[in-house]
Image (cartoon, grey):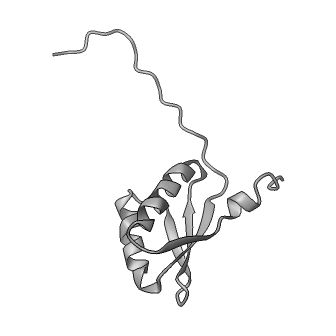
Amino acid sequence: MKNTSRRKPRKRLCPPPPQFSARTYVRVEPSKIGLFRFLLEGYDNLGIFTVTNKFKGILELRYSPHLGREVRAFLDAAATEMTLEVVLNPARRTAGRRKK
């Protein structure tokens, strides 16, 4: 059945592109880094991570700032599968000081 409505669909407003990526440092067991990658890919590649210290299992997780809530939900879900600790969240420490 054909849509007979004359109304045009509304355009979705996209947030402006961010100027920088948000970062969070996470500590996992070094043997669980592969599992962390697998879980992150399962959440539609919410962000990317870099191994900062492979012996201590410290990862730098980078993501778009407007996805902060989803990243926190991912970290909570991943914590049920492995031992996970948020080591440092630079966004919380420097909030309000980033002006240029």
Q: Check the image and report above or below for 8 versus 88.
A: above
Q: Residue at x 58, y 39 (%)?
A: 15
Measured as percent of width and height from the top left, residue 49 is found at 51, 71
**Quarter placement of the N terminus:** top left
Measured as percent of width and height from the top left, residue 25 is found at 60, 71
Q: Residue at x 40, y 20 (%)?
A: 9
Between residue 78 and residue 3, name the one nearer to us: 78
Between residue 93 and residue 47, name the one nearer to us: 93
Measured as percent of width and height from the top left, residue 58 is found at 56, 79
Q: Check the image and report above or below for 93 versus 60.
A: above
User: How many labels were placed on the picture?
Assistant: 0
Q: Residue at x 48, y 30 (%)?
A: 12
Residue 40 in which image quadrant: bottom left
Measured as percent of width and height from the top left, residue 45 is found at 42, 60
Q: Check the image and report above or below for 71 versus 58.
A: above
Residue 39 in which image quadrant: bottom left
Viewed as shown, does residue 83 lie left or right of 38?
right
Q: Which residue is at the far left?
A: 1
